[in-house]
Amino acid sequence: GAVVSQHPSRVICKSGTSVKIECRSLDFQATTMFWYRQFPKKSLMLMATSNEGSKATYEQGVEKDKFLINHASLTLSTLTVTSAHPEDSSFYICSARDKLLYNSPLHFGNGTRLTVT
Amino acid sequence: GDSVTQMEGPVTLSEEAFLTINCTYTATGYPSLFWYVQYPGEGLQLLLKATKADDKGSNKGFEATYRKETTSFHLEKGSVQVSDSAVYFCALRLLNNQGGKLIFGQGTELSVKP
């Protein structure tokens, strides 16, 4: 089945540094990918919709200069957390859909646990 | 706006007990409905789906029926196992909504004891 690979699975960084998280669709092409954030014991909050070849669409309240999204190809989207602070520590999950199967379910990566010290 | 509401957890059951996790939704259009499962430390896996009214999704012994009249998509399983312990998310998707983003319920944690 379709696989979405997310890397790294865990990252620890110091406050003030930037961290890049990659999301790859391994056996399909995805014109749209979604980035979610999940707090402990909480649901998934959609941060932004990543569109191949164009600017990402951010949800209300999400700082686009803080969370930079680049969808440079049909198989790769990246989320960069800039100038990270401890409050950015969270579980980040990406998802993607096969561009040829518009009504197909979203496939999710295994998430990235970010800890900012 | 569009939203999904799930019953609050945690739900604790003994092995082989019957499971129901309630899910209701509010949507302006005609959504597709999904149940996802998240095991500790992992991402989400699609459990089952239904794309129109009266459809029944099923997988691994879990079932859910799309009830338009009650705007519900309750998850059921006749006999749970310890390995079913996870967090379950109900979600809806409107295809005319920014490429079909998913809107999730708050999640229901299930703990199955031997």
Image: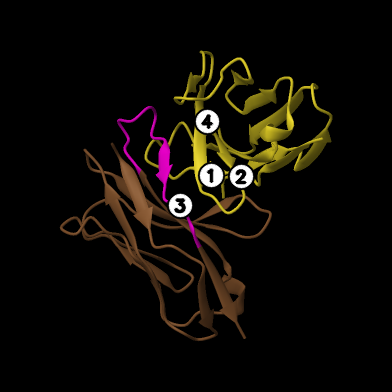
Instruction: Report the residue at 77% width, 22% height from top.
Output: A18
- The residue beneath circle 3 is B106
Whether labels 4 and 2 share one chain: yes
- Highlighted magenta segment, given as a residue range: B93-108
Please say if the residues under marks 2 and 3 sit with CB atoms less than 8 Å apart: no
Report the magenta stretch's main SS: loop
Q: Secondary structure at mark 2?
A: loop
Q: Is residue A92 magenta?
A: no
How far separated are the C-alphas under marks 4 and 1?
16 Å
- The residue beneath circle 2 is A3
Please state the chain letter of the residue tagged with numbered disc 1 in the rendered image.
A
The colour of chain B is brown
Amino acid on which the number 3 mark rests in the picture: Gln
**Residue B84 rendering spot, x and y as whole percentages:** 56, 72
How far separated are the C-alphas under marks 2 and 1?
7 Å
Q: Nearer the viewer, mark 4 or mark 2?
A: 4
Q: Earlier in the sequence, mark 2 or mark 1?
A: 2
Supply the letter of whichever chain is yellow: A
How far separated are the C-alphas under marks 4 and 3?
16 Å
Q: Is residue A72 above or below residue A10?
A: above
Q: Would you identify the image quadrant in which residue A10 lies?
A: top right
Whether labels 2 and 1 share one chain: yes
Please say if the residues under marks 2 and 1 sit with CB atoms less than 8 Å apart: yes
Task: Decide: few, some or many residues near mark 4? Use Cα within 10 Å; few <14, some 14-19, many ≥20.
Answer: many
Please say if the residues under marks 3 and 1 sit with CB atoms less than 8 Å apart: no
Q: Would you identify the image quadrant in which residue B53 lies?
A: bottom left
**Residue B21 rendering spot, x and y as whole percentages:** 40, 67
In this rendering, would B49 be left or right of A78?
left
**Residue B62 rendering spot, x and y as whole percentages:** 43, 70
- The residue beneath circle 4 is A47
The figure's colour scheme reads by chain
Please state the chain letter of the residue tagged with numbered disc 3 in the rendered image.
B
